[in-house]
Amino acid sequence: MATVAVSGARGALRTRISEALEQVFDRVISPTLADEEVSFHHAEWVVHLAFSDDSDQRELIGLLDAAGTCEVSRLVLVSSAMVYGAWPNNPVPLSEDAAVRPNPESAFAVHQADAERTALEWADRDPQRQVIILRPTAVASPGATGLIGEAMLAAAPIRTRRDDPPQQFVHLDDLATAVATVVQLNESGVFNVAPDGWLTAREVRELLGARPIIRVPIPLPGRLDRYVARRVGHQAPKGLLPYTRYPWVIANDRLRAVGWVPRYGNDQVFVAADAGMPWDSMNAKQRQYLSLFVGTSSLLGLLYAAISWLRRVALRDDS
């Protein structure tokens, strides 16, 4: 009986991926550190969902050690395209040959890179071991959006004064079929997971509709993180400012070459998963009041800064 073990992040993400794997394997199991030696017996593959918090790194090390003890030699690690980092000189799109250089302020991206390194070190200890790394872009779907996908949807209306990078969103169902595709390969390697193409800044504005684009000065990493946390919750990832300023969209050619085909486009995922902003339910008068309030607050802030500067100049002249 062919068996695959699925570990790591729980909830809708694991459920959807496990359902896709049930189309390939006779049995899908979910081992824990308490029973991994029993569960891993007869498993051909381990699929680890690394996109979670830092505590999963310890879980990954323990699970890989247990898998090695049970002579499991094939691993799929679901990482994130955020490991490429968001940098001004990134090519558009990024291929799997691009360097791994996550932005250091993003703990989530750094954690994914650490998980990849752990998996590759595990494979290096035994020439029979195979590791496939999947790097999905922001994962989203109605009612089952990953933390990064949810955060990037929340941050979509927020742009800096100079930067408007392209954006990508992959449907959870397409990520699930990507996992089911690569477990049937007899090879190691890295595969990006994304729809065809990406959304341009203009397309994002059109999809946002009447919702205002919020233009903010930079650097404001703390403000962006607090804003996203209010929309997503206390588990919202931090350090996302570079990922809203610079490109990190990826190419899917390598995964398509082994038979995977995305069902959903970026625009479909964005529209279906976008939860909307707080002012979507406001009527015209309420939106007008909000705009007036934001404009007045900005003007007052500029006046305060100017007065403070003039006072400092006057104090220097007096001294």
Image: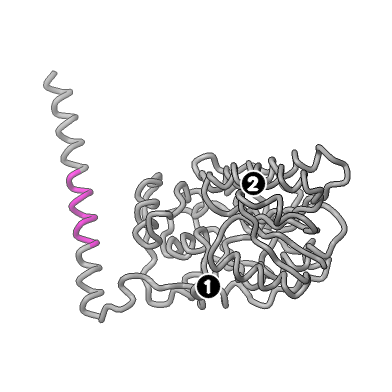
Residue 32 in percent (x, y) is at 61, 53
* Callout 1 crowding tier (Cα within 10 Å): few <14, some 14–19, many ≥20: many
Q: Earlier in the sequence, mark 2 or mark 1?
A: 2
Residue 244 in percent (x, y) is at 49, 55
The vertical placement of 270 against 59, above or below, is below
CA separation in Å, label 2 and label 1: 31 Å
The vertical placement of 80 against 118, above or below, is below
Number of callouts in the render?
2
* Callout 2 crowding tier (Cα within 10 Å): few <14, some 14–19, many ≥20: many
Please give the residue where the numbered disc 1 appears in the rendered image.
Answer: 270
Q: Which residues are magenta?
A: 294-304
Residue 197 in percent (x, y) is at 67, 68
> For the residue labelled by badge 2, is the local secondary structure a helix, a strand or a loop?
helix
> For the residue labelled by badge 1, is the local secondary structure a helix, a strand or a loop?
helix
Residue 312 in percent (x, y) is at 18, 30
Using residue 153 as the reference point, say whether residue 300 is left or right of it.
left
What's the residue at 50%, 48% (across, down)? 242
Give the amino acid at mark 2.
Answer: Leu
Q: Main secondary structure of the magenta part?
A: helix
Q: Is residue 214 visible?
A: yes
Quarter-wise, where is residue 214 in the image? bottom left
Give the amino acid at mark 1.
Answer: Phe
> In the rendered view of the protein, which quadrant contains the N terminus?
bottom right
Please give the residue where the numbered disc 2 appears in the rendered image.
Answer: 60
Of residues 84 and 91, the one nearer the viewer is: 84
Using residue 242 as the reference point, say whether residue 280 is left or right of it.
left
> In the rendered view of the protein, which quadrant contains the C terminus?
top left
Q: Is residue 95 visible?
A: no
What's the residue at 57%, 78% (across, down)? 268
